Amino acid sequence: MPFYVRGAIVLGILFFMFIFTESFNLTGILPIFEWVTRYILPWIALYWFIEFVKIKRVKT
């Protein structure tokens, strides 16, 4: 299993552990969700796009 998959799994587990320890109220979840969508997801999308371009460049 690639290291980025393991990292994503670990981050997901930590994220859910943090949510469950914050007592299910939305005031603890919304700032985390906003931060993740603003700063983390664009980098993941950029990484996937670069990998896609690399794969397409190798095949042609």
Image (spheres, rainbow, N blue to C red):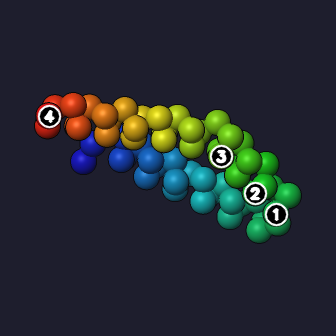
Residue mark closest to the camera, 2 vs 3: 3
Residue shown at 37%/32% (left/top)? 50
**Image mark for residue 29:** 2
Q: Earlier in the sequence, mark 1 or mark 3?
A: 1
Label 4: element kind: loop
Q: Earlier in the sequence, mark 2 or mark 4?
A: 2
Across and down, in percent, residue 49 comes to: 40, 38
Q: Is residue 24 left or right of residue 2?
A: right
The amino acid beneath tag 2 is: Ile
Residue shown at 47%/35% (left/top)? 46
How packed is label 3: few (under 14 Cα within 10 Å), some, or many (20 or more)? few
Across and down, in percent, residue 56 comes to: 23, 37
The residue that label 4 is drawn on is 60
Label 2: element kind: helix
Residue shown at 68%/40% (left/top)? 38
- For the residues labelled 2 and 3, the Cα–Cα distance comes to 12 Å
The amino acid beneath tag 4 is: Thr
Q: Is residue 31 visible?
A: yes
- For the residues labelled 4 and 1, the Cα–Cα distance comes to 48 Å
Q: Is residue 57 left or right of residue 23?
A: left
Q: Is residue 57 left or right of residue 3?
A: left
The amino acid beneath tag 1 is: Leu
